Structure formats: C-alpha cells, structure tokens
Image (spheres, helix red, strand yellow):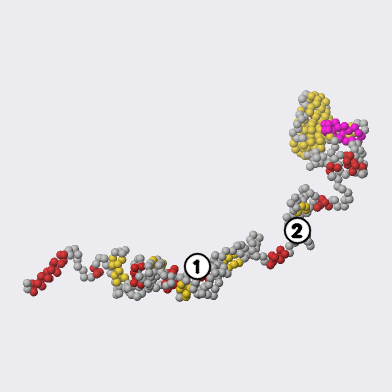
Amino acid sequence: MNKKRLIWLMLLLFVWVLPLSYAGAPIFAYLRQLKDVNTTGIADGKILKYDLATKKWIMAEDSGGAGSGDMTASVYDAAGIEEQVVGLTATQTLTNKTITGTFTGSLTGQASTVATITGLAPDTATTQATQPSITSAANLATVGTIGTGVWQGTAINQTYLVGQSGTNTGDNSANTTYSSLVTESTTVSAPLVKTTYALSMPVATTSADGYLTSTDWNTFNGKAPLTAPTFATSITGSYLTASELVATNASKNIVSLAVATYPSLAELAHLKGMTSKVIDDDQIDTFAELDAIVVDKDLVNKADGADWLGTHDYGGAFLELPNSANPAVVVEGRIAYDTDDEALEVFDGVNSRLIPTVHTIQKTIWDPDGIQSTEDAVPLFYVHADAYPGGIKLLSIQMGADQANSAGIAFEEWSNTTTHLSDIETITFVSSTGVADDGSLADSDIASGNWIFADLDTTDLNFLSIAITYWIKEND
C-alpha cells in the first residue's frame, strides 16, 4: 500500500468508523457541553466541585489545596483517626472527634476545646496542656489526688490529697500545711454556716439560733432575776383585763377575776369604811334572822300586822294593791281592787265602798218627736279634753220610753256640733218600752274633744231616756 492510500484510509477511519462506534454519544470539545457540568458563575481561578444535592459539578472558589494551613490527617497518626478529617482550614476547629492510640502531634488549649484523648501518657506535654493549672488553693481543691511526676515542667515530689496533711513543693509551696484549712468536705453544725471555704454565724432570732448582739445581751442582762425580783415602778400584764381583780389560778399563774363571778373595783369601793362583817344571804332567810340583825325595829316590817310609821317614798316603784273578786277589806282604811266590780274597794269601818272605774252618761229627752221636727240630731255628751285627755271607751247603750214603740235611734260621733264623723250604733225598739245594744258597738272609741249625738225619729213619744256606760282611756 502506498503512502497516499494509507493517508486516505486513516481519514476514512476517523470520519466514518469512529463515529459509528460511539453511536448516540456525540463528541464534545468543551466541558460546558457536558450535561453533568454547571458552569454558571465561571471566572478566573474557579474550580469544579461536585454537588451531591444536584448531582452535578459546579463552580467553586479555590481554597488553596493541601497546604501547610490545612488540618488534615497528615497532622495526626493515620492509624489512630477513626473518621476522615478533610476540608478544614487553619481557622476552623476540630470538634466531636475521638483520637485513640498513641498521639504523636501537638495540642494546645484546655481539654474542653479539643477532642477526647485517651491512652496518652500522663507526663507528656500534651497531657499537661489539657489540664487546668494548679496555681492557688482554690484550683488545688478542684483537682483531687495528684501523683508524683511532672506538672507543666515542675516536678511534684510526693503524692498528697487535698484537705489532708501533706507538703506541696511545687507551685503551691507557700501553702505547706493543709490540715488546718476548710475544704469542700468540711462539715459544720448550726448555727455555724459554711459558704465555700468561709465560716460564718448569723444573728440569733426568735426562730433561729445564732450569735447574741451586745444590744440583746444588755437587754437580757437587765431582766429581773427569777428569785425575789424588785420592780421599781409597776408591772404591766398586757393579757390581763383592765379594772379587774387579779389572783393565781390552779397553775399559779396570775389571771384576771371576771366581774361576772367576782366583784369589780367599783363594787369593792362600797365596802370602804365598813367596820363589821358583810351579812351573807343565808343569814337572812327568815324574819327571825333579819329581826336579830336589825337593831332599829321600826325600820322594817317585823311581823304581819305591824304598823309602818313615817313617810315612805314609792316614787321609783309601782304600788301593787291586793286584787281579787270581792276582796276582804274588813279593816278601816284598807283598800283593794275588786276585779268583778271593776272598782277600787275601801272599808269605812262599817261598810265596803267602791270607787268605780266605769262611768255612766244619763240623759232624758222630752217630746223627742217634737224636737225631731225642728232638729234631726241633738247632742248628748261632750268628751272634754281636760277631763278625758285620752278619750273614752263606750261599753253599752240602753234606752227606755213612756210607751211601747218601734222607734229607731241612731247614735253618732261628731267632731263639733255641725260635723258628723261616724255612726256609733243604731238601736231600735221592738214594740217595747226598753231596749239595749246587742253587745257590739260599731264605733266604741270616742276621741277627746268630740261629741256624742242622738239622731231621733218621728215616733210619738213623751220622753226618751238614754243611759251610756264607759270608762276613761289613758292618754298614751
């Protein structure tokens, strides 16, 4: 085959054969022509970074590659790192990482800012960097037991336990003895109070123990003694009742004597000046006992029938008279109230006489029908205010005529001689010469200053006799 034919054969291979072997897969000359590449934001210095969320390669900033500022696995022992550490720059912090085995790198800072480290020798610089420094008694109290070794470059010569006897020749060499120090394990009893490493005691109150102030001490020192106290002025018992006597009770406590049971100060004042004993009530149960005590017999009624002489004032008391039906007033001058006669009964030495409490109005009208032809109603009785300030109470009305008749007479109450007020009762003869009310009057109370009138009718009579009983009302 000559050289020219070989050239045409190679062109045929690239033009026809190779495209056929990639059927359906076009050949691109640029990355942006690939479907899984997003070149949005392309610029000078940008790199491609795979985005798992979109499953595409996207534009990203160049972080500088694996230079000396990266925190990568090469800084640590690869065999001791349990998860991959990538993508951290010098300004980022490695957290939540567990490093096991032998650590050959270096760490700085406190243990709270670095990963958990296990299996490290206690005397390495790395261990020292992760422990708090011991520079004061306060820090010493939070560490606990420290073994012999090197601590931050200073030798610890012997083991000691905080709060126990021992000697520290390291950073805390100034505090050589710890047996006298207050520690976290120190316990105290009330009223002592421990706050961290300080002891204190509060002031005593009514409900809590404590120390006594000088003011309180002086107050207590000024109290009266328990035996034979002396009071210069007075004693005030706020629980006692004013103006009552005091005495001791069954428990020997001083208490007030209630005036409901015992005398008050005012009552005791009545005894002032008495020179003899007080008479008990059981000493005067009988007249004989009273008669034996009272020297002047005229001062008392020493027996029934005795005469009282002198003047006796009953202005502040009611006088109750003997009262009964037909009282036996058989001694001259006696007085009693006769309940069935409604009168005071006195004896004149021979007869019992009555002073009635019931009175009678008696009137006789001549030619009543003749008067009626001139005046329809005529006055019978005036209730005078001077004699009857409380008015009167009518009890009954009775009438008599010269002949049997059937006249009806109306009795009325008038306020004056021209003004009718009310009807007292109308009483009618029943073909008889005498008649009385039926025991009930429509208006029986006649006021003081009013009149009783009789309204006559035309029945021909020569006279009409009227009798009205009443009693005088009290003036309330």
Residue 403 x, y percent position in the rendering? 81, 24
Q: Mark 2 or mark 1, which is nearer to you?
A: 1
The type of residue carrying mark 1 is Gly
Residue 340 x, y percent position in the rendering? 82, 31
| Residue at the limit of the structure toward the left, as seen here | 1
Reading the image, the residue beneath label 1 is: 144
Confirm whether residue 354 shows in the render.
Answer: no
What's the residue at 9%, 72% (across, down)?
6
Q: Which residues are magenta?
A: 324-345
Reading the image, the residue beneath label 2 is: 236
| Residue at the limit of the structure toward the front, as seen here | 158
The type of residue carrying mark 2 is Thr
The residue closer to the viewer here, 164 or 308, is 164
The residue closer to the viewer here, 197 or 271, is 197
Confirm whether residue 111 shows in the render.
Answer: yes
What's the residue at 67%, 66% (across, down)?
213
Element class at badge 2: loop
The image quadrant that residue 187 belongs to is: bottom right
Element class at badge 1: loop
The chief SS type of the magenta part is loop
Question: Is residue 18 one of those drawn in magenta?
Answer: no
* In the image: residue 84, left or right of residue 326: left
Question: Is residue 325 one of those drawn in magenta?
Answer: yes
